Each structure stands twice: as structure tokens, then as C-alpha cells.
Amino acid sequence: MKCRKCGQKAVINMRQHKLALCKEHYLEWIPQQTQRFIEKYRMFTPEDRILVAVSGGKDSLALWDILHRLGYQADGLYIGLGIDGGIGYSAESLRCCQNFAQQHGLKLRVVDLKSEFGHTIPELAQKSARGRGKPCSVCGLSKRNIMNRVAREEGYTVLVTGHNLDDEAAVLFGNTLNWLGGYLRRQSPVLEASHPGLVRKAKPLCRFYEREMAAYALLRGIEYIYDECPHAVGAKTIYYKEVLNRLEAERPGAKLRFYLSFLQAKEEGLFAPPEKETQELTSCVSCGQPTTAGELCSFCRMVEKDYAVSR
Amino acid sequence: MSVKIILRDEEYEVRAGQSVRSALEKLQIPPEAVLATREGELLTDDEILREGDVIKLVAVISGG
């Protein structure tokens, strides 16, 4: 198969776009398309101070690389979750992030959950009712809190994550199967700051297939953690991705159409919010972050010993 | 001699002369879920496998 731009041997064929590219043109195409999505969805501008949430995986490090190449002011945030799983998962993912930052002369902010809040994710999952048997829920809550907190306290104007189209389509699939209207209304390439304590969020990779991001990381020579998080084994998201990939194999472009037609339908008002949709947000008395959970936000309630279920 | 395909800790043998996509389908590995590499080079799905090839597959799905 030949590159559509130069006729050299292609390294990737994107069947949904009927587009095959060689290494050189693929490494040009991905940042160009990212810039197009940033502008199309009005994600941010070169004046913004961007915080990139990096996990050491292919997507977030590829995103950091792309934003850096596009000339954005983007610092990294790594959250040490204290997950070992017999493979030193967190240690290895931190090493990949630190290597990347050092090689590119970029600033990496590291927050270690155990040092700053007293518990690792596996410990919190054991202790709290929320985490019983499902560390992913505890992990998501912790990451959302810390990402917003760091972005807000350190003056970043936008927080970006490496969610790709497969991530978005899998979440959309799950929310559609269960008709979770509230989540469907909120799913978007950009999440506006709906409260002064919340930082605007954006997902610049939301239109790239996961396979394309892995190809970008490999071709660019980005060292990323190849192992899956040990707690993600059997996760529903992975199952939904597999189902969608079976569909994609038969119908190239099915995942992309599913996501884009959802965004289009949303824009046309299919998921118009009910009249009284928004819940009252208050500030958490401990960390000051916006919450609907009462005096203490869910994260502070979870990490504070008195509130944890330890018996 | 045939073609060796490696995915994580698993090794498979397939016959040469078929495309990457055809081999993956026979092994019931969804082509969308992996990238095929030969000697570190990425391969498109229509690449024909040659006798003695060692194809390493990079799993691309993550989640949780």
C-alpha cells in the first residue's frame, strides 16, 4: 500500500478515512489534525496555560508531544497512584513521564497520592465503601479532584486529557445502553467550567482512533508504559471497545460515525437539558473544590479516616 | 518454515503468503486492536507475510 501524499510505502492505513500514509506524512498529519480539532471545538489558544494530565501511557504522552510541537505552553501533571500489581505499574509509568519531560525540556508536576493524602489507590479501595471491589471508581474520583485542584491552584486555564475516539465511543456506548441522560448531556470534546472552582477541560485527541495514537507513539519513538493497569483487566470499558472494534472491522468508520453523529445530534438539541438540570454546587470545607456532596467533597470524605469504612 | 506471530506472551504460527489482515482474522485477533510490526517497522494490513517472518503485534487497547 502506498502513501497517498508521496507514493512511498505506507505504514498505516486508516480505513475510515480511506487514507494510507508513510511515516513522514503520518507524523505531519496527526499534529495538523489535532490543531484542526483544537480550533473546531474552540478548545484553547496559544495564550492559554495548559496542564496535560499524563499517565505514562501512549495517548497522554503523544498528546503532550503534539501540543509541544504545535507550540502550546503545556506542562504535565502526573498523579502517583501507588499501583504495583506485581509489575511496578506506577513506578514504571512515572519513569516514562519523567523521561519524556527530561528529553523535551518540559515541566512535569508530580503529585503522589500516598505522600500527600496518606493512601494509595489500592488502600483507598480497601478502606472506602466506594472502592469495595472497584478501584477504578476510587481512582477516577481521586484523579478528577487532584487534576482540577492542581490546575486551579497553579493558574492553568485549561486541563487536557489524552482521551481518544475509542475511549469516547466506549463511554458513549455504555451511557447509551443504559440511557444515562445526564452523562450523555455532559459528554463533549470540551467541558466548560460551569463553576468558578472548576477548570475548563478539553480532549484534543477525541477524534483519533486508539490504534492511530499507538502508531503515532511508536513512530515518534515515545517510550510509554505498554502494560495495562492491573486493575483495568475485565473493565467494562475494554469490553465495549472490543464490541465496537468488531463492528469497525465489518463497517470501517462505524466508531467515528457513532461519536460524530452523537455530537451532531447533541448540537441539534436531541439531549436538551431539562428545565432544572443543574445541582447547587458548594465549596468543600476541606479542599475548597466545588461539590454537590455537602460540606466535604466525595474525595475528602474518602481520604479522611473518620469517614472511611475500615471495618 | 512459516510465520511467527507474537502478541504479549502468546506465540502463533501461520502460513506465509497471506496478508497480515487475513492472518489476524484466522487467529481471531481483531485487526483494529493491534498494530503489526516486522523488525520494528509498522506494517499495513495488506502486507504479505513472508517465510520466516517474525511479526510482533502491539496491543493498542487500554481502559479502565
Image (cartoon, rainbow, N blue to C red):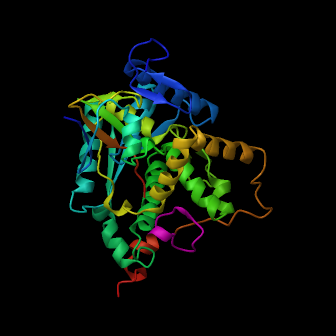
Classify the position of the N terminus of chain A by image quarter: top left
Say whether residue B64 is visible: yes
Q: From this view, report whether residue A273 is shown above or below residue A61.
A: below
Q: Is residue A310 left or right of residue A205?
A: left
Asked whether residue A158 is drawn in magenta, I would say no
Classify the position of the C terminus of chain A by image quarter: bottom left
Q: Is residue B12 left or right of residue A32?
A: left
| Residue furthest right as drawn | A275
Q: Main secondary structure of the magenta part?
A: loop
**Position in image of residue A188 (x %, y %):** 62, 47
Q: Is residue A279 left or right of residue A38?
A: right
Q: Quadrant of residue A254?
A: top right
Q: From this view, report whether residue B28 is shown above or below residue A122.
A: above
Residue A107 vs residue A18, the one in the foreground:
A18
Residue A178 vs residue A3, the one in the foreground:
A3
**Position in image of residue A256 (x %, y %):** 59, 40
What residue is at 21 percent from the left and 57 percent from the top? A87
Residue A199 vs residue B26, the one in the foreground:
B26
**Position in image of residue A261 (x %, y %):** 68, 43
What residue is at 40 percent from the left and 21 percent from the top? A10
Q: Quadrant of residue A90?
A: bottom left
Query: Which range is magenta?
Result: A285-299
| Residue furthest top as drawn | A6
Residue B23 vs residue A45, the one in the foreground:
B23
Q: From this view, report whether residue A185 is shown above or below residue A18.
A: below
